[in-house]
Amino acid sequence: MPSRAALKLVDRACPGCGGTARVDAHTFTDHSVVRCTACGFVYLPVAVDPSVFASGDLAWENASDIKTARQRKAKPLRARLDAATRFRTKFAKKTPFDYLRAAFKGKTELPRIVDVGCGAGHYLETAAGDFIPFGIDISAALARVAKEKFARRGGDVLNLSSLEGLAAFQAGSMDAVILRSYLEHESEPKPLLAMSHRVLGEGGLVVVKVPNYASLNRRVMGNGWCGFRYPEHVNYFTPASLGRMARETGFTMRQSFFDALPTSDNMWAVLTKA
Ligand SMILES: [Zn+2]
């Protein structure tokens, strides 16, 4: 793990309510995950300067592999058990396109969809369906690859931070925002949702997939839960805390029982621009 100085860690207030009073919820050897005593939100009380993720060892294209290998070495049994029980997630296999296809049925113009943190664009590239793909990614190398793919379909990719990228798109110009395995990384999730609201047209949707801190597996695995990733994961949402943040940024959240199964490590939610 790079030193604290190399990561440019900065202190962080509660992303839910802005409060600074907190208690330790999970203590690890080199850091703690805390719970806000005012609103109950669970979060990492520090965040890495986003520029650190733009290239090098902690860039998105490298970090996950490093973490998985490191975790496997440190806790072989736990990590292996965790991998062995991944079949659970198959029960709730769903993609944002299941929601979007239904929502955009009958729309005459092609829907415009922006994938925040799109990486090399694999996700929207492989998704079947008629829509125009847009993306934002802070990694210059990945954004370049995605831009080439999306441009062929009339879309575009911005090599900016997510907030800057959403600000650069015209207000009301998008039909959907995809936050797939993204919001847990965002040090400013509330402004990010507010910016998503701005970029969406009337009735626009945000499709969210995040680790579910309220999941059964988190309670069973404790500090060994696969959702804990330091320093990449800075927010630990529950259905309740995600719903509250959605309401406070102008959305109505829809989440069925199957979108947040207690047996899945992740949850889905659809936020509609109110
Ligand atoms: Zn709070």
Image (cartoon, rainbow, N blue to C red):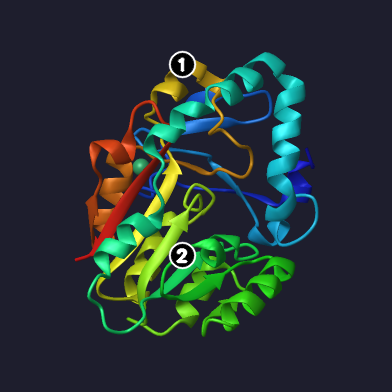
Q: Residue at x 78, y 37 (%)?
A: 1
Q: Residue at x 63, y 37 (%)?
A: 230
Say whether residue 159 is visible.
no
Residue 188 horizontal side relative to residue 160, left or right? left
- Disc 1 marks a residue whose amino acid type is Val
Q: Residue at x 60, y 73 (%)?
A: 160
Marks counted in the figure total: 2
Q: Quadrant of ligand 1?
A: top left
Residue position marked by numbered label 2 in the rendering: 128
Q: Earlier in the sequence, mark 1 or mark 2?
A: 2
Residue position marked by numbered label 1 in the rendering: 220
Q: Crowdedness of circle 1 by 10 Å Cα count: few (<14), some, many (20+)?
A: few
Q: Is residue 98 above or below residue 142?
A: above
Give how far across and how far down residue 217 sits, in percent: 45, 22
Q: Quadrant of the C terminus?
A: bottom left
Marks 1/2: CA distance?
37 Å
- Disc 2 marks a residue whose amino acid type is Ala
From the viewer's perspective, is the residue at label 1 or at label 2 nearer? 2
Q: Is residue 34 above or below residue 202?
A: above
In terms of secondary structure, where does tag 1 sit?
Answer: helix
Residue 146 horizontal side relative to residue 254, left or right? right
The verdict on label 2 being within 8 Å of ligand 1 is no
In terms of secondary structure, where does tag 2 sit?
Answer: loop
